[in-house]
């Protein structure tokens, strides 16, 4: 038995071209080829193209202003002077109306697109170009179609989402993410009758966006293991063990930050700790980033193929309906086999 795979060709349409990191354009790593290397590695799995879904769950997760901005930003940018003036054909913010700027004063919304972008995007690495919205919106359909399969009776389904989404909050995007696919999948599971849904995030970086979406909610438990942000890693100000939720969601967030260089033993041990913590939930979403691998350009962790397989076995052994949502993973040489190893583990002995 192999876990079904859901994907959409439209997820290839986002081409980041480059990122701007500490003021320097660097080549983008979240590239369309990620889709193809994963698909090639999962040859033999039942494969489905995503079906269109309405915006109901998407608007439950995200503010309408953010969605409206993302849907039109690339077209509006192309109609502006940016290509002619500076050769920039991607939306990239340079101005961020933070609390330090506002100083308690009520702002008037910025008129210029290059200024408005910083009200929605919180970094300079997450550029919007032609096809970005279409790819991100297709990734949401991928996640929802995978949830549909699970709700129809599959034990698990894998959503080949691209671009990833766990850094997106209700109101803002960043970290190479535009829409929060895992959060939308969780909403679909809740709406279908699951009273408590768990999200376990194994990406190398903390899913600050998913944490924010469910920070004050008791119906979704969010647990993440990731490289310690205090060591200088994105998202820097979130992902610490002291963050446990607030209000009705107090105690429903758990973070396990790991030291640089962490390998299979302690990493899988952290997965097991989170699995035990969510064992009473009736459905599971896995934010399946595989960028904790030793060869990945975006992480200092040292997890191997065997580690990802073991993590899959740990979470699969929970025995609850599971939607497995692709997040990070940028080493094109090994990306596909790492995803395949996790799915093999999650499916259990019958897949061996």
Image (tube, helix red, strand yellow):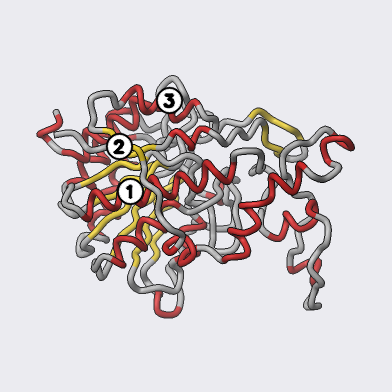
CA gap, disc 1 to disc 3?
19 Å
Residue ID for mark 2: 48
- Compared to residue 75, the image places residue 16 above or below, namely above
Question: Residue 109: x percent and y percent?
Answer: 79, 68
CA gap, disc 2 to disc 1?
9 Å
What residue lies at 81% left-to-right and 78% top-to-bottom?
105
* Quarter where residue 221 is shown: bottom left
Tell me which numbered mark, 3 or 2, is placed earlier along the sequence: 3
Q: Quadrant of the C terminus?
A: top left
CA gap, disc 3 to disc 2?
15 Å
Question: Residue 199: x percent and y percent?
Answer: 34, 56
- Compared to residue 218, the image places residue 211 above or below, namely above
Which is more toward the observer, 254 or 78?
78
Q: Nearer the viewer, mark 1 or mark 3?
A: 1
Tell me which numbered mark, 2 or 1, is placed earlier along the sequence: 2
Q: Quadrant of the N terminus?
A: top left
- In the structure shown, which secondary structural element does the residue marked by tag 1 occupy? helix
Question: Residue 343: x percent and y percent?
Answer: 26, 36
């Amino acid at each position: 038995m192999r876990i079904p795979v859901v994907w959409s060709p439209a997820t290839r349409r986002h081409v980041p071209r480059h990122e701007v990191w500490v003021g320097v354009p660097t080549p983008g790593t979240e590239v369309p080829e990620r889709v193809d290397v994963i698909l090639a590695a999962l040859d033999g799995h039942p494969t489905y193209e995503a079906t269109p879904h309405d915006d109901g769950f998407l608007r439950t997760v995200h503010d309408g202003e953010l969605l409206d901005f993302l849907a039109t930003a690339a077209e509006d940018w192309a109609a502006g002077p940016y290509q002619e003036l500076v050769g920039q054909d991607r939306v990239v913010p340079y101005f961020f109306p933070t609390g330090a700027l506002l100083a308690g004063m009520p702002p008037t919304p910025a008129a210029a697109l290059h200024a408005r972008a910083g009200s929605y995007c919180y970094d300079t690495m997450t550029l919007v170009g032609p096809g970005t919205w279409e790819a991100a919106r297709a990734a949401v359909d991928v996640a929802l179609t995978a949830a549909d399969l699970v709700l129809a009776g599959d034990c698990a389904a894998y959503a080949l989402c691209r671009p990833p989404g766990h850094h997106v909050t209700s109101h803002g995007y960043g970290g190479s993410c535009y829409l929060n696919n895992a959060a939308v999948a969780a909403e679909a599971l809740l709406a279908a009758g699951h009273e408590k849904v768990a999200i376990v995030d194994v990406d190398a970086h903390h899913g600050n966006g998913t944490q924010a979406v469910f920070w004050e909610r008791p119906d979704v438990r969010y647990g993440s293991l990731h490289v310690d942000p205090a060591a200088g890693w994105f998202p820097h100000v979130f992902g610490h063990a002291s963050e446990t939720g607030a209000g009705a969601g107090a105690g429903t967030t758990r973070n396990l930050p790991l030291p640089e260089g962490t390998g299979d033993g302690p990493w899988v041990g952290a997965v097991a700790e989170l699995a035990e913590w969510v064992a009473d939930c009736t459905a599971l979403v896995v934010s399946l980033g595989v960028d904790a691998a030793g060869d990945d350009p975006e992480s200092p962790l040292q997890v191997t193929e065997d580690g990802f397989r073991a993590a899959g076995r740990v979470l699969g052994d929970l025995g609850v309906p599971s939607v497995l949502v692709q997040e990070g993973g940028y080493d094109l040489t090994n990306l596909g086999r790492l995803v395949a190893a996790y799915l093999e583990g999650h499916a259990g002995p019958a897949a061996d």
